[in-house]
Structure formats: C-alpha cells, structure tokens
Image (spheres, coloured by chain):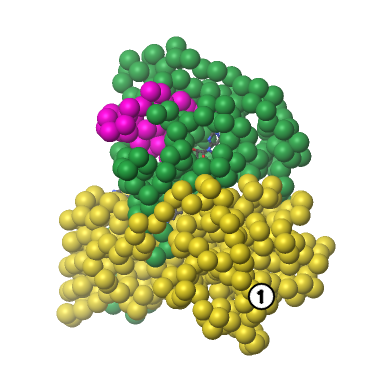
Amino acid sequence: MAEILVYVLHNEGTLNRNSLGAVSEAAKLASELGTTADAVVVGGSDLTDDLLGTLGSYGAGRVFRAAGPEGLAQPVVDVMAKVIDEHGHGYAIFGGGLLGFEIGAGLAARKQAGVTMEVTGVSVEDGKLVAERPILGDSQISRSKYRGDLGIIIGRINAFEVRESGSGPAEVVDVEIEYSPWSTKATMVQRGEQRGADVNIEDAKILVAGGRGLGKAEGFELAEALANALGGAVAATRAVVDAGWYPYAAQIGQTGKTVSPKLYLAAGISGAIQHKVGMQSSENIVAINKDANAPIFEFSDLGIVGDLNKILPRLTEAVKAKKGS
Amino acid sequence: MKICVLVKEVPDAAVEKRIDASTGRMDRNGEKNLNPYDTHAIEAAMQIKEGGVIPVEEIVAVTMGPESAVRALHKAVSLGADRSLHLTDAALAGSDVAATGYALAKALEREAPDLVLLGQQSDDGECYTIGAVVADHLRMPSLTQVIQMDVADGGLRCERQAEYGYDTVQVELPAVISVGDAINEPRYPSLKAIMGAKRRPLETLASGDVGIDVALVGVDGSRVSCGEFHAPPAKAAGQIIEDEDTNETVEQIVAWLDERKLI
Ligand SMILES: Cc1cc2nc3c(=O)[nH]c(=O)nc-3n(C[C@H](O)[C@H](O)[C@H](O)COP(=O)(O)OP(=O)(O)OC[C@H]3O[C@@H](n4cnc5c(N)ncnc54)[C@H](O)[C@@H]3O)c2cc1C
Ligand SMILES: Nc1ncnc2c1ncn2[C@@H]1O[C@H](COP(=O)(O)O)[C@@H](O)[C@H]1O
C-alpha cells in the first residue's frame, strides 16, 4: 500500500509547526488507509537524529534526511522524487507556507502528478485521499480526486492540527542525492532577515491591524493611538510590511504570525485569504473599510463601511473617554 | 536577453466569479481583463529593459487560453511587450495546474528565453504555482513571490518574504521568476500604445506546433479532477454600520465593544 510522504520544513534547528500538523494529519490518514506516513527533511547539521526522531511522536515512521541547502524548493523536489521513486509513496503532503507550494508544484511537474493547494481538509474515500479546497474567495469548496500513482496535497496554513500520538522515535534514513543541475542554480545569500523592530503581537489580547488603506507609513500613527487607548498592540498585513511601513514581526498571515486575540480590529485591510488564515480564530473581529464589498466584511462580526481617517481618531478619543469614565 | 512574460485573461474583479454547474469549470462569460498580478511581471520586464544593466532585445507575452485571451495579449503589448504568443487548442481546455504549466513550458521552450516572468497568482485560479511547474519542465531555477529583483553577478539578486522573514537569493539565468505585487507600481499604457497594440506581431499556436503531448493535457490528461462544489458552512452574518454620522458610528462601535467587555 502506497505510503504518505510529508515534507518537514525547519529553521535553525526547529521544526515548523505547520509541518508537524501535516505529519499528524498524514499519520491519521495513513492509518485509515492501512499504510504509514514518513517525513522528509533537507538541510544541514542541525537535523540531528534526536531532533528528527521526535517526528515519531507525531506519527512519522521513517524520516528521510538529505544534506542540502535550506529555504529553497528545487533541491527538495529532487530529494522527494528520489524517495518516491525508491519507496513508492502514493501521496505527498505539505503544511502551509511558501516553500510547500513551490516544492509541491515542482514535484507535480517532475512526477506528472495531480496537485491541490490551499487544502483545508482531507478525507479517505474508497481507499483514496480526497482533498477539499476553498475557491473563489472561500465562497465555494471544491473536492479534488487524484488519478495516477501520486497525489499531492498542499495544506492551507493552520489547516492541520498538531497531534502527538505518543509513539516512539522515528527511524532516520539518510538519502544520498545528486542534485539536478538546475536545482543548484539558486543559492541562498541570506535567509530569514527580520525587517524592522522586534514586536510581539502573539500575546496581545487586543490587536489593531493596519493595511494599505492607512495610505502611508505615517498612517500607522492612527492605529497606534487606538491600540494605546485600547491597551493593545498593532499588527499589519504583508502589503504594508513589503512596502516598509511596518515591521515584519507585526505581520499576520500565511508568511507571518497566527494570532487569536479577544479583539482584532482591522483598519484599511481588504481581507485577503493569506491574511485571514492568520487571524480568523480571533474572538471578535471588527473591520473598518471604505469599500462595502471588501472581503473582510464576509468574516467580520462588526463591519464599518467608512473612511478610517475620519473614524480612527474619533474612536480613539471615545475609547479614552469611556475608559476615563 | 530575451524575456518571456506569462499573462492570463481573467474575469474582471468587478464580476462575481462562479462555477458553471453544468461543466464544473469556472464560468468565463462576462467582462474579462488581463490578470492584474501579471501587470507587475510586465512592469518588472520593462524595468530590466530600461535599467540598461543588461541589454534586453525582446519582451514576449505568452498566454494559453481560448480565443478571447488575445485581449490579454493586446493589453500586455500596450504595457510594453514587443510581440505575443497565443497557445490555443480545444485539447488544452480543462487542464489542471500541472498540465497548464507543462503546456506553457512547451511553448516557452520554442522561444528559448533567458528569463520567464509571471505574476504571483491568477485572480481566478489562485494556484500560486504555475511558475514552479514551468521551471521544472524547462530545467531552470525558480523563485516565487519576488519583491525585489536586480541584475547582479551575471544573474538576478532576488528578495522575497518566506516563512521565517526575508530571503535574499542569487539566481543564475535562464530562470523562471514569479513576482509579488509589491515589486513595482505598474505604469498605465499610453493611448498610442493601446491603439498600436493590435498591430504588433501575434502568433497563434496549437498543441502540435510546440510538441505538446495531448495525452498530458486537457481534462483527460489532468491528474486531478475538481468537482462536487459546495458552499462552506454558513457563518452568522456580522453587523454592518454604514458611516454617515461619524459621531454616531463611533458611539455604536464603543457600545458594541463595551457589551463584549473589550474596553
Ligand atoms: C503566498 C502568499 C503569502 C502571503 N502572505 C501574507 C501574509 O502573511 N499576510 C498578509 O497580510 N498578506 C499576505 N499575502 C498578501 C495578501 O494576498 C494581500 O495582498 C494582502 O494581505 C493585502 O494587504 P492589505 O489588505 O493591506 O491591502 P489591500 O488588499 O490593498 O487592501 C487595502 C484596503 O484598504 C481599504 N481602504 C483604502 N483606503 C481606505 C480608507 N481611507 N478608509 C478605509 N479603508 C480604506 C481598501 O478599500 C482596501 O480594501 C500573501 C500573498 C501570497 C500570494
Ligand atoms: N493560462 C495561462 N497562460 C499564461 N500564463 C498563465 C496561465 N495561467 C497562469 N499563468 C501565469 O501564472 C501566474 C500564476 O497563476 P496561478 O498559478 O494560476 O495562480 C499568473 O499570474 C500568470 O502569470
């Protein structure tokens, strides 16, 4: 029976949480299919036997380890293709993130396999995996079925729960690999640069999040004033982080932080899926946006259609007044 | 250097996108436009050309799609492409991501570009991945989501945000790069460019012209089939306030927050 292979991303000796979720999910699916789940890692000397052994407690049987560059997709495609060729895995699963998308797609090309991305749920039907993917701005869910020898599933971030099954350490298997010529033509110059101040948004009970609607870097002063009044912190979208308006450490979303504060208040944020996945479990969601059709209103508890430049300063004053009373 | 830019025609953002229940595919009727994310890829090509660090002989817009997709090519040309290539064939309809990437790679192979640029996502498909598929078929290095790209050391010095912060990656040419929407501010086409776009060379190609194995494309050649569309569990609709009198709006927000003990 064709096993499931899961790519596990890591950085500085720590395994990625979404990858652990993918391993947990694969282990669960594998037991339903009557097969087993394995993991694959590519990197340097921080990938010790001890560290990789811990993947056993999330349900991985074997961990295939190859020496190679970190943070780049194409070398991992080579390694996974080789492991699959030798061991006959029937599915490859990735947690959320950027590299998973690139590796999964590259592997689909290499192995002529079907691939589904942004998957939020996987089930077993007639002895095969079926993947669910929200489409069209999460307004519909589509079900993917696979043909052929390999099916590739790229999860949406936070879609797969991390579950410890309490099994013993996984067996570590070293893979000797000769990389494809084109897989070594991209080289990492610097990985994981933190741009801007190191702020903590994950522990805040209240977050005022700012997006491109704030207009310019100085626009964040409005968000900061409100956050101060409410006793919370300020968070941001990738659009404004990429633009250099706010620090990366404050970013919520697919390639940022996942938060679930008591109150999340968005100012000038459209509500793109990649942002939503990082904040949708917030207890109370409030959004201020001048566009009544902004997707964020689809998942807000309170939506205000209006100009944030008018609303934020007065809201700050009103909150201060309320607190003072 | 020769740059190929992948572009796609997508339903206009103002049009509600939906699935055609009879075919299980995207309903592609109604207003269509060039995928807005692709305008960043064309702009990136123009900036390399105008930057002058490396001479750019040609920028070629490439699309795969039905007859109507020529409009996306015209738009791409009005934004700076020198000519365009339209891969169109009934056999290609219904291709999944892997099949689409394979077909585009075959069309690109014939052009032998030094650089393939594409957008971070298509507005309708939202797969984020065509670039990685194309690159593996072309045997080229590849990166997605690039927001800074400079010609350096005979290749490209690229920056992008990944899982752990910003990565800087040096990529040798030829390469396939998908650009993020923060990379640039696309220009508006001039009226003259819009008028002239239809007169620029546009080549139409069928599967056979570029050696596509039709067993690997279309509905039957795709390894994944999507269907059984259904609505997600309904979430209780939130309360909406249209801001007319801001003092009143603010009062309502404060009351709402207060009710939930958030102040
Ligand atoms: C692989 C990948 C990973 C990504 N990762 C992330 C991530 O981790 N986090 C993230 O946030 N994004 C991420 N993105 C980007 C995401 O898709 C969106 O582009 C981004 O979230 C948009 O940010 P925004 O809402 O600030 O900007 P926009 O989408 O431009 O929205 C700005 C909003 O402000 C409103 N507005 C403008 N002026 C005013 C005003 N005066 N008053 C009120 N409202 C106003 C507008 O109506 C608009 O809705 C990722 C994308 C990809 C492809
Ligand atoms: N049919 C197509 N023809 C040409 N380019 C495409 C096509 N589909 C997708 N692309 C390119 O691939 C990018 C990413 O699309 P996607 O992977 O569908 O999100 C788009 O921005 C386009 O540049």
Q: Chain B is shown in which shade?
A: green
Picture quadrant of residue B89: top right
Position in image of residue A123 (x %, y %):
71, 65
Question: Which quadrant of the rendered structure holds the N terminus of chain A?
Answer: bottom right
Position in image of residue A76 (x %, y %):
55, 59
Asked if the magenta segment contains residue B49, the reply would be: yes
Picture quadrant of residue A66: bottom right
Relative depth, front residue between B4 and A247: B4
Q: Chain A is shown in which shade?
A: yellow
Position in image of residue A203 (x %, y %):
35, 79
Relative depth, front residue between B87 and B72: B87
Is A256 displayed left or right of A65 in the figure? Answer: left
Is A52 displayed left or right of B187 in the figure? Answer: right
Residue at 36% over, 75% down: A202
Residue at 51% over, 29% down: B112
Residue occupied by mark 1: A62
Residue at 37% over, 33% down: B45
Whether residue A188 is visible: yes
Asked if the magenta segment contains residue B151, the reply would be: no
User: What's the magenta region?
Assistant: B36-63
Relative depth, front residue between B139 and A15: B139
Question: Which quadrant of the rendered structure holds the C terminus of chain A?
Answer: bottom left
Position in image of residue A301 (x %, y %):
43, 65
- For residue B207, above or below residue B239: above
How many residues crowd mark 1 within 10 Å: few (<14), some (14–19), many (20+)? many
Whether residue B161 is visible: no
Furthest-top residue in this view? B199
Picture quadrant of residue A179: bottom right
Relative depth, front residue between B208 and B69: B208
- For residue B245, above or below residue B131: below
Circle 1: element type: strand
